[in-house]
Amino acid sequence: MQLSTPRTILLTLVTATTLTLTGCVADPDIADDLPDQGAPPTHVAEVTFPDSEVAQTSEWVVEEINGVRAINKQDWYPRVSPELSEDIPVDSLVGTLNSQLRPSLPFVPSDYEEPEPNYGITRLTPDLTAQPVDLHIQVDNTGLISALWYETVESDATTDTTEQPSDDGEEIPSDGLGQ
């Protein structure tokens, strides 16, 4: 049995009103929240970014990564150069940051350097259960992000090359952990 058009419209309006009044509508203020971001690491001090274009862009990216909500790709379109968005679509770039970096947050920017003009490296330090990440950002002459990548920093424990004596007296490199 099919309902008449006015009756269908009336039922649709009643259902929509009921859902709205009972709070069954997505609230943008709480959508995409992470369950518990935890406290920022206390074993490192936060750096102050210098007053350069690439440093300010780096600081903005760190704030985006550490944000309460997932990174919104709409905020990135005006900040990414056309050359970078041709190589890596903004959707993919933001999706990677959301899925790869945000699960380890909060990060503290514990070190910052500019080895070249318009190129900055920010050391992002998470809590003690995860390894630090170096975030590389390059901006073009207009201040748009022209390159962005990150790499996990090897901890001192895994790169220790102290030599240990073997049973026959020769020195062998140490693996660091589990000796």
Image (tube, rainbow, N blue to C red):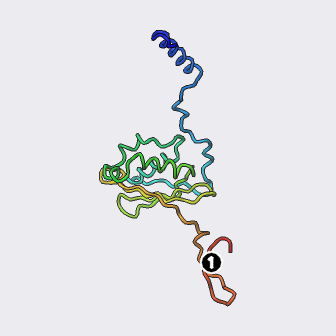
**Residue sitting at 35 percent across and 60 percent down?**
117
Q: Residue furthest front?
A: 1
Q: Quadrant of the C terminus?
A: bottom right
Question: What residue do we see at 60% from left, 21% from top?
Answer: 22
Q: Measuring 52% from the left and 19% from the top, which residue is drawn there? A: 16
Q: Is residue 92 above or below residue 135?
A: above
Residue 31 coordinates in the image, percent (x, y): 54, 35
92 with respect to 175 (left or right): left
Residue 2 x, y percent position in the rendering: 50, 13
- Residue at mark 1: 174
Q: Where on the picture, by quarter, is residue 23?
A: top right
Circle 1: is it few (<14), some (14-19), or many (20+) Cα within 10 Å? Answer: some
- Residue 130 point in image, percent of width and height: 60, 57
**Point 32% across, 54% down: residue:** 140
Give x and y (percent) for residue 154.
Answer: 55, 66
Q: Nearer the viewer, residue 86 or 131?
A: 86
